[in-house]
Amino acid sequence: MACGDSPTCTCTRKSGEPTPDPQWPAAWVSDWNMYRAHENWQANPPPYADPPKTLAPSDYELSQGTSYYDSTYKPADGDGDGAMMEYYRRRCLPIFPKSNHYSCSFVSLGNKAYFFGFPEDAPQAPDLSKTAYFCFFSPKNHPPRPNFVEHLPYNPEDTARVPDIQAYSLTTPGPAGPPILFGYAFEKNGRADAGGGAPYQHPFAFYFSGYIELDEHGQPTHGAPDAPYVSQNYVGFHQEKPGAFADLWAKVDKYRKDQKAPDCTLFENGYPLLDPGVQAVQGATGGKKRGRSWHHIKR
């Protein structure tokens, strides 16, 4: 079985590839810059430097967000372990049809994952009281394990795109057009956090294929959100003590218990508050071919 054929396989590193694999700390937090490449992307795939060196500023849109992670969290219902929140400010993760001009959060508590939609001008830190839309994203979407990179092949071509990184990625065929990319890069050399501690390889970027619409010939139509490639480049990544985000997870757990969360239909319909009257009769693209998205990665 080739590495990448199964989400449970472990990649065997080839001679000359870096070992051991880098890992996430048990708990961490980081801001990030998200670059949505929408022009000249075919010849300039990620990972990108921060800011991108191979793209002009007019080729991409920049937005920001924050990620919180604790692999030691245990949900009260015992369903899985680990917790993670990714908070996207002003621009949601561009993997769904239609515009991503709103703020959002994806939260995994053990195996269960939830989606929070916020106004575009949401505050710097996540505030659940500002939630405009809430839905149940998945019953099986646990946070990545600290050693998740062992499931990704080392990619020397991606590694060469930015100095002093190690990149790991896989691609899978999309419904039409370019394949779907899913990649992760770490800094090549270990270093301590700004606050001290033992050195380790800090994450550099999470990079992937976003949503694009395709015409009948399989070519991009520039339909929203027009995100052929996306890169989340970490800023200020640092370890935290396990349990540091207990209050955050408790607030999410209370919110999901208090609310009746419908199942999300984001991959089919996009964000409902942007166009609440539309029914997905022909699909969210109104007859156009659906673009590639994470929906097509069966992992």
Image (spheres, rainbow, N blue to C red):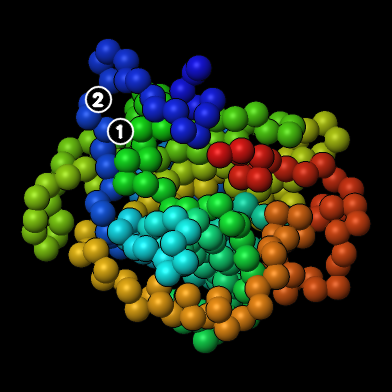
Image coordinates for residue 66, horizontal then vertical, percent: 39, 65
The answer to whether residue 55 is above or below residue 286 is: above
Q: Which quarter of the rendered picture does the C terminus lie within?
A: top right
Q: Residue at x 73, y 43 (%)?
A: 291
Q: Residue furthest top?
A: 15
Residue that carries the numbered disc 1 in the rendered image: 166
- Disc 2, disc 1: CB below 8 Å? yes
Residue 85 appears anywhere in the view: no
Picture quarter containing residue 68? bottom left
Judging depth in this view, the residue of 112 and 49 nearest the camera is 112
The numbered mark, 2 or 1, whose residue comes first in the sequence reads: 2
Q: Is residue 265 left or right of residue 150?
A: right
Q: Residue at x 47, y 53 (%)?
A: 142
Decide: few, some or many residues near mark 1? Use Cα within 10 Å; few <14, some 14-19, many ≥20: many
Mark 2: amino acid: Pro
Residue that carries the numbered disc 2 in the rendered image: 18
Picture quarter containing residue 70? bottom left
Element class at badge 2: loop
